[in-house]
Image: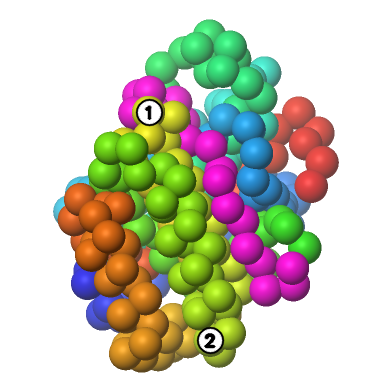
Amino acid sequence: MRGETEPDIGDRKDASSITKRISNSSKGRDSNRLTLTSGDLLTDLSVFQIDQPHQQTLLHAAVTTTREAESEEGIQSSAIFRGTGGGDVAIFTQWMNRRTYDQAPQMLLKPPEQDLYQIAIVDHITGQGASHLAIEDGLFYFINVFPLAPGKHDDLIDFFERTIRIVRVQQGYISTNLLISLDARHAVNIGQYKTRQDFLAMSRRPHVLMAFAQGFRRRIVRRPPRLCQYDLLTVSLYHDTQV
């Protein structure tokens, strides 16, 4: 499993300085709350696997793009995640509709079509049917991306619904957010826990591991998911989006 080592002091200072600059230049952005709900809203998630020396360069470029995107009518919201155990950067975007995505110029917030998703499941510990990405919440994030076996869309939904019953009673659990690509070839789980320690404790429990393994045993996924741990770096809302 990638990303289980703590980031070093230099990494923390770099992340802190970036976050501070974003906060200073984008008034009110630190209190933005991006809402995730299941449905037909077009979303995308691009995960860049890069080495640590180039992570900061990509983060700066992504932050600049989110500021420039304020003039794009089709983007509803975006979030940038920084990998804590490596050089990964994940960029999440919500679009008004497919037409606005197609018409938008090429940029970091607009991935290729294979990275387009719809949110299939949102489970929040409160039972409210929605979860939120918000820096002020101070939550721990993990994102796992996995290839979906052909014709297994419904099996994946069933598998997640069963697994959620097990993980949602674990200490520190906040939410599970399952995204399935429009071509049904990939799926993504964006998970939230109160702390990294809560997540690691959950992931080491034998009965939880057995539940996770069922996805591979039932041949729903073609190989074990790639999982990375993240800090939520920025959240941007556009055109007076209500949350």
Q: Where is residue 144 in the image (x, y as percent from the top left)?
A: 35, 58
Depth check, front residue: 46 or 107: 46
Which residues make up the magenta segment?
109-127
Residue drawn at point x = 56 percent, y = 18 percent: 98
Q: Is residue 119 visible to the viewer in this orientation of the structure?
A: yes
Residue 129 numbered mark, or none? none
The residue singled out by tag 2 in the image is: 170
Which residue is depicted at the point 24% across and 55% down?
Answer: 219
**Residue 23: % across, % down:** 63, 54
**At 79% across and 47% down in the image, what residue appears?**
243
Q: What element carries label 2?
A: loop
Image quarter (top left, top right, bottom left or bottom right) of the N terminus: bottom left
**Residue 111 point in image, percent of width and height:** 39, 28
Q: Mark 1 points at which residue?
A: 183
* x, y percent for residue 227: 30, 63
- SS at circle 1: loop
> Is 123 included in the stretch rendered in magenta?
yes
